[in-house]
Image (cartoon, rainbow, N blue to C red):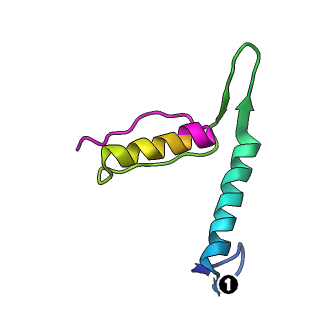
Amino acid sequence: MKYRAPFAKAWTKMSLDRTMDMVVARVWDSRQRTVRAGEERLAVDHTTGICHLGGATLDNDENYLIKKLFTGGLGTVCVSNHAGI
């Protein structure tokens, strides 16, 4: 993998493990900063700081798993998906 740090002019090589660790850390940090947990009389635990897009090439099972990961696992607000194309 190649990575270019903010404001850097050159790309550097980075291992896949380190790249994945950085992605996970940034996603989790975004979730922690934007989560709305247990407001007055509401049992909420969701974030509006993370989103995802599906695609028409994914089948129903793949879209179901992605939806469960993002809504149940990360607490994103689910709007819709359309896998019937």
Residue 23 on image: x %, y %: 64, 63
Pick the front one: 49 or 22: 22
Q: Which residue is mark 1?
A: 9
- Position of 44 compared to 59: left or right? right
| Image: magenta residue range | 71-85
| Main SS, magenta residues | loop
What residue is shown at x 30% (from left), y 50% (from top)?
A: 56
Q: Residue furthest top?
A: 41
Secondary element type, mark 1: loop
Residue 39 magenta-highlighted: no
Q: Is residue 75 magenta?
A: yes
- Residue type at mark 1 is Lys
Task: Residue 50 in the image: state x and y as whole percent.
Answer: 60, 46
Question: In the drawing, does residue 56 fall left or right of residue 32?
Answer: left
State left or right for residue 79 relative to residue 85: right
The image quarter in which residue 15 lies: bottom right
- Residue at x-position 62% and y-position 67%: 20
The structure residue drawn at horizontal position 65% and vertical position 78%, both measured from the top left corner, is 4
49 relative to 8, above or below: above
